[in-house]
Amino acid sequence: MTIFTPTTADETLSAVQWALAEEAPLEILGHGSKRGIGRPVQAEHTLDLSRLTGVTLYEPAELVLSAKAGTPLAEIEALLAENGQQLAFEPMDYGPLLGQTPGRGSIGGVLAANLAGPRRLKAGAARDHILGIHAVSGRGEAFKSGGRVVKNVTGYDLSKGLAGSWGTLAVATDVTFKVLPTAETETTLAVRGLYDEQAVAAMALAMGSSAEVSSAAHLPYPAIARVNGGRFGSDAATLLRVEGFAPSVAARLAMLTALLKNAGPLEEIAGEASKALWREVRDCVPFAGDDERPVWRVSMAPSDGHAMVMALRRQTAVDAFYDWQGGLAWLRMEGGDAEADLIRTLVRKHGGGHAALVRASAAERAATPVFQPQPPALAALSARLKEQFDPKRILNPSRMGG
């Protein structure tokens, strides 16, 4: 077994060219924080990008940052915070959910997994903020796409195309993201004690108002008892985040309070407490830990997710909470079985969507279609992309199935 640890783009290119010449598949790693997602990779050799690090360009006034792919995301976020800026799509940290220490993810992994957080409805995901890449294809060819300025859209779609490809098309060596100012203040309004269906209606009302709610989530019991050290007790909490300048936040909170005064008891969570709460929602902390009870990430229309979860509860033991106004359901299967066929059947029955198994044992991941099976036309397109970028199948083989 060979482990390549390049420190430059040229060394990365050489490693891929060796693998191509030997027809020896490679497992592509940053810092391994998401290694447990997807089917186990069938590769004897490893391309470890953890030493390919460093911010190569940061111009706060131009709202742009470039970094080598192995640069820790935590390092980048600390640098941005010093300048009052952020990655507005607030990429999730999968480490806690997969039983690892937080803060191990890399900026290249952010693009490869197309990460997003609770602000997804307002700010989008990684693919909506990527400006440019340097990468190496499975053909052993270095290429670049996009640029280092916000207005440059040359090759922009190719940069987006690698988002969510999980290292199966190319190895990114340098990425450039758009960054944005951090909100001056934030406050979360929590509506307590709502059932799932009531919570979805309250979130829809809030998101449809002129209060400019940036995030909406619902944590029933027992998920609510597992955040912020249990300070919220056991009553369900429907969370609505408002961000911006302090006077504007105060005015919009007053609007929301009036709008939802009859929905249930209201509670305000301000400043750092609000930020900590949304980080835990973002990182799926209610289901974090060392156990291997399967965890699913199901995206559906916000009006359909709670009905699917209710139908699932009638047939098996499951714990759940919701983000994205109810459009993202996190499911932990309490019985220990992945129940893939059941979950995907119910998703189809309740309007359709995507269900991905994001935590399970290696044996379970090997036996289960981890990512949502693609319709025939999309599967054919994916196959053509793979043929163009990695015809010898040397990059992360089998990770996305097939």
Image (cartoon, rainbow, N blue to C red):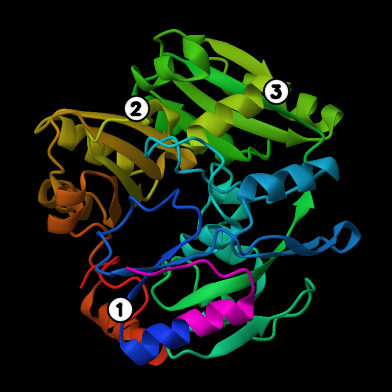
**Residue at the (21%, 49%) spot, across then down:** 362
Give me the C-alpha separation between circle 2 and circle 3: 27 Å
Task: Let me know if residue 10 is in the magenta part.
Answer: yes
**Residue at the (90%, 59%) spot, across then down:** 61
x and y, in percent, of residue 371 in the image = 28, 60
**Residue 378, disc:** 1
Q: Are marks 2 and 1 in contact (CB under 8 Å)?
A: no
Name the N-terminal-most of marks 1 and 3. Answer: 3
**Residue at the (34%, 38%) spot, across then down:** 330
Q: Is residue 311 left or right of residue 301?
A: left
Q: Which residues are magenta?
A: 1-15
**Label 1 Cα crowd, 10 Å radius (few <14 / some 14-19 / many 20+):** few
> From the viewer's perspective, is residue 246 above or below residue 330?
above
**Label 2 Cα crowd, 10 Å radius (few <14 / some 14-19 / many 20+):** many
> From the viewer's perspective, is residue 260 above or below residue 175?
above
* Residue bearing the label numbered 2: 196
Q: Nearer the viewer, mark 2 or mark 3?
A: 3
Viewer-proximal residue among 135 and 205: 135
* Residue bearing the label numbered 3: 272
x and y, in percent, of residue 279 in the image = 57, 33
Q: Is residue 37 left or right of residue 142?
A: left
